[in-house]
Amino acid sequence: MKAASRILPLLSHLTTHFILILLTQNSNSKFPQPEETSLPLLPPPHLNLVRRFAAVDVAARYGGLMQARRPACSVQHDSNVSSREQVQSRRKFLKATAASLAVGGLLSGCHELNLAKFFNRDEMMRENVRSAIKGEDGHSRLIGDYIKISESTLGYIKVQGVGFVHGLQGTGEDPPASPLRKILLDDMRREGISDPNTLLRSADSCLVVVTAYIPPIVKKGDEMDIEITLPDGSEAKSLAGGWLLPCRLSEHALLNGRVRDGKDIAIARGPILVNNLANFKKGSAAGDRRGIIPGGGKYTSDDRQLTVAIRSDYRTVRMSTTIADRIGRRFYDYNKSGIQRPLCSAKSNAHLELIVHERYRDNYPRYLQCIRHMTLTEAPVEKHMRMQQLETAIMFGPTAEKGALQLEAVGSEGIPILKKGLTSKSPEARFRAAEALAYLGNGDGASVLRDSAELEPAFRIFALAALAALPNFDSAEALRELMSSESLETRYGAFRALSTMAPNDPFLKGISMDGDFSLHLIDSSSKPFIHLTRHKKSEVVLFNVEQEFQLPMFVRAGSKILIQGKPSADGIIIKRIAVGEETKIREVSPRVADVIKAASDFGATYPDIVQMLIQAENQHNLPGDIAIDKLPKPGRVYHRKPEDLGSGGGSASPVPIGSDGLMPNLFSEQHNKPIIPGTSPEPSSAPEGMNAAQSPNSFEVQ
């Protein structure tokens, strides 16, 4: 009866509609379209269905009955039926129709609520799609209003493993019996180690939990950061000086009360940079029990692509193929045979698979922005009128961002208008136009992007990312000039952009060191600056090649290498002293680059070099600044100027430029990782003998 109560209002609408139609009929007229005000209000799609039903379905279903029960038309003057008989016949028919509808509706409603006959959901979606493609009934023209990017493709995949660290100087432990120890022993035997228990008993080694976060759009062979922690209850004192042996990482899930491993999708190895080394002041003991290996993981599984979901009220095959075709015409590449391949394909009526264009690989949020600003369909006249509007929008700060994105989404046809934007008096408009031109492969705005990065901190991160996406001489030269900026983050940001765009550029002077890191010597005219990293890669960047240590100096590079420089000496003595080894000694100049090279030759790892430089900073031995991960940030406030607003005026209030969600992945540090939801084991559901803290899916140490 509950279903019946829900269907009665519908039947009331339909019955009233039929009565209005039939009462207004005459012998020489068609079924009239009743005024909407004669009915209780229905949503427009429902009202359209009612009209269609009334005009077609009723006529088809009941035409015979009407012919049989209704007298002839008034134009047949020879009819023997009086007007009173016509009225009575109409009334009888209407009563029969209303009663039939009511009884049938109640019976079907009591059985089950099935409104497909009247309000077919698929038909409504098809109506929505037809209107959207035609741009009718207030539907948006932009693709972004019909799609959303699946959270499962934008999140990070958490993978873990149990690893073995060696090289500790008596700060390790023999791990107690536990499920984690059993996992490690099984892995070591699988790698061909015949007596792993002997290795684990050494105080120079320990068991660790290894964690990595697989980022979106990762490709097979890409590198990622590795986090190292000691498990709860471990008595190991420090990871300093440790080296992680190859460790396979996989996903973990709880199935039927037991922790199950997924397939291996990454492998990790390398020297551990303990958290305390990131601090220029003495850290806590806990900081030595955690560490990171920058770029120490390698992804070994299939490429991750983006999944685009169609909004639920537009999920038809026609809509998914229309959107996929539209994106595929704008973004494509070529396969090994030279055949053009669209970068978007419809996988179902509800989902699309999207491959990121190579130009946007280091800034995929921009790629998604561009796609959202593409038009679904557009007639030539409509496109011409829209381009005229965008020509005006690109000249003023408040409207330039959306205008530039729409012109970028158009493709090469938008370049002439974007070039006009470079002549605007508005700094914001010029920046937006130059940014869009860069992603279209046009370098005319390279100088504008250089000035934006140098002079306006709010534009900096996006200007540098745009220059990195433009592999030509103009952008490379702009980035080289920015490496002499007074701003430290601008200098290193420009280095990151150029090393990503052209890793073999001679200006970068990259040298691979034996300790699993790279040394870069930059000919910079600004004051000396040393940059270190904790994310993405292990590298030391020296801005100003000739910078020297200030003497006297006595520092260590790890536990075995001593670096000493006396005030009266012209050079620095480097010694390697280790038990069971012959002492090695070398004298080099005070140049920072020479000391780093010599220490690496003596076996210093990247963490050892970081230790040496931070000690030198604390002792005031460095000639300039030193920084770790000095990068520009999104979301900074831009204070609009009068020229941004134009003659029309407007609000000159500060506006944020970008957000964390729009941060180019070129500069992402993955601090707040959106993790793809998974099944985590509850404490009571852990396997026998394994508590929640020991479970492979709960490896983190609090």
Image (cartoon, grey):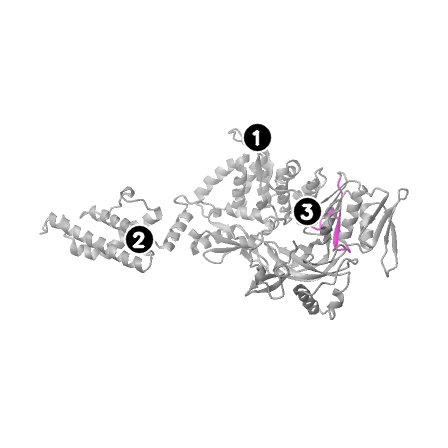
Q: Provide residue 572's location: percent of width, then percent of height.
A: 86, 47
Q: Quadrant of residue 69?
A: bottom left
The kind of secondary structure element at disc 1 is: helix
The kind of secondary structure element at disc 3 is: helix
Q: Quadrant of residue 140?
A: top left
How much space separates mark 3 and mark 2, taking CA atoms? 67 Å
At label 2, counting other C-alpha atoms closer than 10 Å, the crowd grade (few under 14, some 14-19, many 20 or more) is: few
Check the image and name the residue furthest to the bottom.
194
Which label sits on residue 643?
1
Confirm whether the magenta stretch covers residue 528. no
Q: Provide residue 216's location: percent of width, then percent of height.
A: 59, 53
How much space separates mark 1 and mark 3, taking CA atoms? 32 Å
How much space separates mark 1 and mark 2, taking CA atoms? 63 Å
Observer-side mark, 3 or 2, equals 2
- Where does the magenta region start and end? 498-524
Q: Is residue 383 above or below residue 302?
A: above
| In this rendering, position of residue 604 left or right of residue 67 | right
Residue 91 appears in the figure: yes
Which label's residue is closer to the chain start, 3 or 2? 2
Which label's residue is closer to the chain start, 1 or 2? 2
Q: Nearer the viewer, residue 369 or 337?
A: 369
Which label sits on residue 117?
none
| In this rendering, position of residue 12 left or right of residue 226 | left
- The residue pinned by badge 3 equals 496
Q: Amino acid at mark 2?
A: Ser
At label 1, counting other C-alpha atoms closer than 10 Å, the crowd grade (few under 14, some 14-19, many 20 or more) is: some
